[in-house]
Image (cartoon, rainbow, N blue to C red):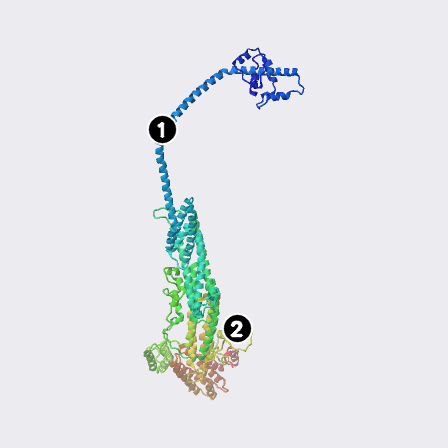
Amino acid sequence: MQKIKSLMTRQGPKSPQENIPDRSPDEIFRIPNKEELRELRDQPTDPQAEQELINSIEEVYFSSETLDIVKYELEKLPPFLNLKELEEYRDKLKQQQAAVSKKVADLILEKQPSYVKELERVTSLQSNLQLAAIICTNGRRHLNVAKEEFTEASLGLLANQRKRQLLVGLLKSLRTIKTLQRTDVRLSEMLEEEDYPGAIQLCLECQKAASTFKHYSCISELNSKLQDTLEQIEEQLDVALSKTCKHFDNGHYTKVQQAYRLLGKTQTAMDQLHMHFTQAIHNTVFQVVLGYVELCAGNTDTKFQKMQYKDLCTHITPDSYIPCLSDLCKALWEVMLSYHQTMQWHEEHDNEENAPASDGAVVVNTDESNFDRGYVKKKLEHGLSRIWQDVQLKVKTYLLGTDMSNFKYDDFIFVLDIISRLMQVGEEFCGSKSEVLQESIRKQSVNYFKNYHRTRLEELRMFLENETWELCPVKSSFSILQLHEFKFMDQTRSPSVSPSKQSTVAASTVTSLFEQHRDGGNPFEMQADFKEDETEDVLASNGYESDELEKSAYQEYDSDSDVPEELKRDYVDEKTGEGEGEAPPKSVSRETLRSRKRSDYNLNKMNSLILTNTTLNVVRLVGKYMQMMNILKPIAFDVIHCVSQLFDYYLYAVYTFFGRNDAYESTGLGLISSRLRTTLNRIQESLIDLENPPENSGTQPAVEERKEKVPSPHLSQLVNLTSSETLYGLAERVVATESLVFLAEQFEFLQPHLDTMMPAAKKPFLQQFYSQTVSTASELRKPIYWIVAAKAIDYEQMLVIMANVKWDVKEIMSQHNKYVDALVKEFEQFNSRLNEVSKRVRIPLPVSNVLWEHCIRLANRTIVEGFANVKKCSNEGRALMQLDFQQFLMKLEKLTDIRPIPDKEFVETYIKAFYLTENDMERWIKDHRDLRH
């Protein structure tokens, strides 16, 4: 209505207003027909009036909402109706209706051409639709014919083909499901064959296939079963991985690693591997020790199986200690060798993956695989020290579980040798210095060595107190390196020696222990089987290489029995100038004569060594101590200190037995040097126990200090030092003193080796020991042989004879006094006894020289003392003194080749002093304090 109203407003009224007849409400809005329209048009119109009528129509009549007009108009009626007003209102409504109808008619007539034209189009459209209906009817008819004659048959074939394909796929799926159902049998077979990669690959493929057919109800149960199977494979794979910890097999380990790689658990495998190695070490050592404990216990008591490893180690008996330790190290070696081979496998595997392929292509490494290899490498490198630390702790617990202080020396050395080899394995394994093992073995070694050394010192005292100081015959070619105890020194210098006896040998070889035993064997297997030949052929027959040599030696001595006279004559001729300028008949030089004269005391055994059984035992002890040092460097200083005590005690014993004499100080001869005296005092204070042990008294430190000391030895009663026939035990003195010198020479020989073993901070001790003690051994000759020299010649008798000589003669005498002959006779007798002693023991030239020097020095001082006791003496008497002394020198020089004669100037100066004036005498006395009495 609003549109009509707006249209009427634009158009304006075109026909005159006419009265609208009364109509029912349903006819109000009826569209007028043509005649009515024509009538309406023919009616006169006032457009302005019509427009005003239209405008006066209420808005409600133009509303698009459904409106009951009758009701609306009735509701508008006033309460009291007025007919006239109603008629007027009715007329107004009619006018309005007529105006609206007139307006509508005008509009319809105006749009009629368009309507006709549109009607034609509708008619054309109706014709087209009828044609389309005919076409569709024909199409349906033809389609029905095609369906009946072709489509149903062809599509039936296609449907059947499709159904066939579905059934074939279903059959394939069913066969796959059937195969999956039977997979567990094949997996079990592959696991028995240890084909872990194949089993995992098959299981993963089955899981993938199962996920493809998960829409089948039977597959869900199968998938769960496959997952359980995969977990079972992982468990068996873990067991297989643990087997590589004791016996590494390259093929077996390759399968295991490939399997873990398929699972994507390379890092997990490495973590598990280290856990298994740790467990293998624990289980291995526990089972080895448990086996020996149960074997020694001799019963089937299960209480040992429930013990901790530490407690179990305390039940090892001394007899089974070494075999158990050896087996322990063998088992641990197998574990470490497996770890070493595991690392080598990964290194070779990484190199193969990084190397270019044979066809020139380069293997592509993903970031994940590179990360895994880096993780494995770091894990393995870190595991080296961890594995070795576990090994050290287990062996340490075993070592400290038994007190080895009472072990035999060879057994203890064997233990040290095994541990030394184990430490060498550790150094090659991870570069470790094995501080844990060193500390534990150091504790045991110090404990053992203190007890061992204390026992050896007591044995040495017993040997010395029972020593008769007889010569121990050894070959002239004897060397301490021939002794069993010093074999290790040859081994350290020889590269061909088996590595089982010396760690330094293996260290010097090119290949490591792991390379040597990669294909089998064990570095600790040779320990038990390797026994050196302990028999030594160092002793000679009666001090000679053979009986023929012995016989020829005495024949030579007998044939030269007249040599002294010949020597005297030749020497006098040379000395007095007879035949001067002429060559001796046999062109014998002075050196030749001296060497021939020395043969009197050497008995033609120029190279024979002077030593005793005790000396040999000390040398053997030193060798054993050095073995311990060589194997266990940390206690080298303690051992060397004990070695020095062996030498100290031997030196002190020789001095106590043969050299102690209170008369030294009164002689003024300086027989004992300040260095020797300091050494003897030091030994007495630090090593010799001079007190009687008190009963149940003394503090603990005092008791411990006394344990470190040894009682002073006592000379055997079988040794006679009072017989003049044997020159007061000269043979025994020579053997004792020269055996000490021999021992000192051996120590000098060993000094470079000891120096290499000694810690740098402690080397001054070793240097001081050699400079203050070892070098003083030869100085003991003077005090020891001085006692013989003091008793061998009757110096008191000489003083008595000299006292009876008249020195206040008035004329110069041409004949010497008888005391000179008596003194020379004493020297000749001394020389004869010396020859007798030399038949028993070789008297070295230094010994002979010391003896002669002492005797001559004492004789000259006796002469001076005799001269000093003279109450009355003339100048002629002084000349007689000079004559006597010159005669004594002349005859003495025929007996000995010592030049110059000791204290010759001492006597001559004293005689000449009588000719000095009073002032010169006073000055002379001040200058010669040694001549004042």
Give percent across and percent down for residue 214.
42, 45
Residue at figure coordinates x 64%, y 21% from the top left: 76
- The residue tagged with tag 2: helix, strand or loop? helix
Residue found at the very far right of the displayed protein: 80
Instruction: Using the rendered view, name the quadrant where residue 92 is placed.
Output: top right
> Which residue was labeled with disc 1?
145
Is the residue under label 1 in contact with that under label 2 (CB below 8 Å)?
Answer: no
> Is residue 630 in sight in this rendering?
no
Q: Nearer the viewer, residue 932 or 750?
A: 750
The residue tagged with tag 1: helix, strand or loop?
A: helix
Task: Specify whether 761 is left or right of 76.
Answer: left
Taking 762 as reference, is 553 above or below it?
below
Q: Residues within 10 Å of mark 1 (few under 14, many from 20)?
A: few
Alpha carbons under labels 2 and 1: distance apart:
134 Å
Residue 632: % across, % down: 45, 66
Residue 64 visible from this viewpoint = yes
Of badges 2 and 1, nearer the viewer stands: 1
Identify the amino acid type marked 1. Val
Q: Nearer the viewer, residue 418 or 78?
A: 78
Which of disc 1 and disc 2 is earlier in sequence? 1
Q: Which of 145 and 352 lies nearest the eye of the viewer?
A: 145
Q: Using the image, tell me which numbered label, if any, was put on residue 705.
A: 2
Q: For this rendering, which residue is in front, 564 or 25? A: 25
**Residue 55 at x, y percent in the picture:** 60, 17
Going by the numbered disc 2, the residue's amino acid type is Glu
Where is the N terminus found, in terms of image quarters? top right
